[in-house]
Image (cartoon, rainbow, N blue to C red):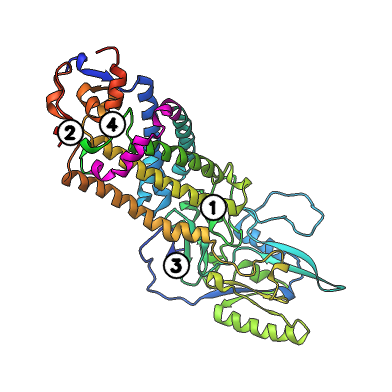
């Protein structure tokens, strides 16, 4: 949601630079999956801070509740039971939500000026007052995050509590996390913190522990510490190498500028054809004499 | 101009059908461009703002698709390509430099008009199908995301091809003087028919002259 004290780096459907003289530090939220106990306090804090109350659903026989992200549930716990090693069950619990990509596919795809912005601190935010409900953000997102509300046909997702961050507070989920699995700070500090966690995890036998900060989307401002960073798919299908779909790149990167130009060129070509070659006239001598000898067709200009 | 000098080219129903398709096309092109490139987003104001444009665009699209379906039926038989048409296409240079006397005889429609007809058949079909796939909020949620991504590309490329075709169509109607009244009034001067569509002229005047 809008908070103008945050400086803007990129703005949807805007081809000129956004006001970006003031530089603020890049922030990041780091989610350490090895520390998460799946209590869902972050889901509750998100609801409370953002005044969201999702429909009360039904139990589907799994811990995931609600079963998926919705316009009113901007973060959900994803529970995966996996056996990475034979006979050793692991319960991997991933807090799902917007990853706040440095190269956001939603923003690239959005046709409504200013409906999606990227702040200088890296947060990608939806400004629903400009949203037209077309769903292009869903098309552009490599993580399947935005949801369109049935109530108002606007797209919603995690704001990384941009309103809190803008006044120097940490996101609500970070504030509430009882195990310290979610931490927040400058991206640099978070990477440093993650490195320490990875050293610790490796010392405890998780030899593939690592940081999830996928370069395919320019890195993200929500990062994970994974016990099995070589297999992010284990974590409820977290993509191994996420990137903006080539179809979306083709659509917004090539077709959008060149086809727009093409239409202009075609129109101008028609105009200049007319003023250089001229019209196809009907030979005049035949015009008024329907019964008479019509002039030879050779007389055409 | 006396009535003797005019012959009917388009029946009133042809004209109504054509113009319904044309009006819906213009509305779709304007709103579609607004949704395509920010340079055209100001056009959304013509439709009452972004959300209204997003709501209206697909419904107008359905009207165009239905309207065009009937239009295609009306003109189908007259748009089949012949050997002379392919020759005409090969002499496109003579066409655009107004050397009509070098061209093979043209029937009710010339090869350019026929080509546009087939471009329209193809693009309208693609636009309809891909448009349903990306139609929010009614249908898009039921399609897989990869299909939606392909559909937006198909939708924009088809729209581009159709718009190029229509730019040529509108210009050609103006360029070939006397053509527009055929579709606005339904009649054309005999001389126009004789000169631009001699094959068709012979056919419609057979037995009467």
State which chain disc 2 sits on.
Answer: A
In the figure, residue A284 lies in which quadrant?
top left
Nearest to the observer: residue B99 or residue B40:
B99
Q: Are marks 1 and 3 in contact (CB under 8 Å)?
A: no
Asked whether residue A135 appears in the rendered view, the answer is: no
Residue under label 4: B105
- Picture coordinates of residue A110, whole percent (x, y): 47, 56
Magenta stretch bounds: B71-96
| Mark 1 secondary-structure assignment | helix
Is any part of residue A167 visible from this angle?
A: yes
Q: Which residue is mark 1?
A: B150
As for residue A233 lying within the magenta part, the answer is no
What is the CA distance from the residue labelled 4 to the residue labelled 1? 42 Å
In the displayed structure image, the side of residue A101 where residue B197 appears, left or right: left
- Circle 2 or circle 4, nearest the eye: 4
Location of mark 3 (residue): A5
Query: Which is closer to the viewer, label 4 or label 3?
Result: 4
Query: What type of secondary structure mainly makes up the magenta span?
Result: helix
Horizontal and vertical percent position of residue A222: 60, 71
- Dot label at residue A281: 2
The local crowd at label 3, few if under 14, some if 14 to 19, many if 20 or more residues have their Cα within 10 Å, is few
Between residue A287 and residue A182, name the one nearer to us: A287
Gap in angstroms between the C-alphas marked 2 and 4: 17 Å
| Same-subunit check for callouts 2 and 4 | no
Q: Is residue B72 magenta?
A: yes
């Amino acid at each position: 949601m809008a908070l103008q004290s945050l400086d803007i780096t990129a703005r949807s459907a805007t081809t000129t630079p956004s006001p970006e003289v003031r530089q603020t530090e890049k922030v990041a939220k780091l989610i350490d999956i090895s520390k998460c106990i799946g209590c869902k306090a972050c889901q509750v804090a998100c609801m409370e801070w953002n005044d969201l109350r999702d429909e009360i659903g039904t139990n589907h026989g799994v811990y995931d509740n609600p079963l998926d992200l919705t316009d009113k549930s901007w973060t959900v716990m994803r529970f995966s039971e996996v056996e990475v090693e034979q006979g050793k069950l692991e319960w991997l619990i991933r807090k799902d939500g917007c990853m706040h990509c440095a190269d956001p596919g939603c923003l690239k795809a959005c046709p409504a000026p200013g409906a999606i912005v990227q702040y200088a601190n890296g947060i990608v935010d939806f400004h629903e007052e400009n949203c037209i409900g077309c769903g292009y953000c869903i098309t552009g997102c490599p993580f399947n995050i935005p949801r369109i509300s049935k109530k108002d046909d606007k797209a919603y997702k995690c704001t990384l509590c941009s309103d809190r961050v803008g006044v120097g507070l940490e996101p609500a989920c970070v504030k509430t996390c009882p195990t310290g699995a979610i931490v927040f700070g400058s991206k640099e500090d978070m990477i440093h913190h993650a490195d320490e966690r990875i050293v610790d995890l490796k010392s405890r036998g998780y030899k593939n522990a690592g940081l999830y900060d996928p370069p395919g989307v320019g890195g993200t401002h929500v990062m994970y510490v994974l016990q099995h960073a070589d297999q992010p798919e284990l974590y409820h299908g977290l993509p191994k190498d996420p990137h903006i779909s080539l179809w979306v790149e083709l659509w917004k990167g090539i077709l959008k500028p060149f086809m727009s130009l093409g239409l202009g060129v075609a129109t101008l070509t028609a105009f200049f054809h007319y003023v250089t070659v001229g019209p196809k006239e009907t030979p005049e001598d035949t015009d008024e004499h329907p019964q008479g000898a019509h002039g030879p067709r050779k007389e055409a200009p | 101009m006396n009535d003797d000098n005019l012959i009917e080219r388009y029946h009133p129903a042809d004209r109504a059908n054509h113009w319904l398709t044309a009006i819906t096309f213009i509305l779709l092109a304007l709103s579609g461009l607004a949704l395509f490139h920010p340079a055209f987003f100001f056009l959304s104001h013509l439709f009452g703002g972004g959300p209204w444009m997003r709501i209206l665009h697909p419904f107008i699209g359905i009207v165009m698709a239905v309207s065009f379906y009937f239009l295609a039926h009306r003109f189908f038989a007259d748009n089949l390509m012949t050997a002379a048409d392919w020759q005409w296409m090969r002499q496109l240079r003579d066409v655009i430099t107004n050397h009509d006397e070098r061209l093979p005889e043209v029937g009710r429609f010339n090869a350019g008009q026929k080509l546009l007809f087939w471009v329209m058949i193809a693009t309208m079909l693609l636009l309809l199908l891909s448009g349903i796939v990306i139609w929010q909020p009614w249908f898009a949620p039921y399609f897989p995301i990869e299909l939606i991504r392909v559909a937006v590309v198909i939708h924009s490329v088809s729209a581009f091809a159709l718009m190029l075709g229509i730019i040529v169509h509108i210009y050609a109607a103006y360029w070939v003087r006397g053509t527009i009244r055929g579709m606005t009034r339904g009649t054309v001067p005999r001389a126009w028919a004789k000169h631009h569509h001699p094959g068709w002229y012979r056919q419609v005047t057979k037995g009467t002259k």
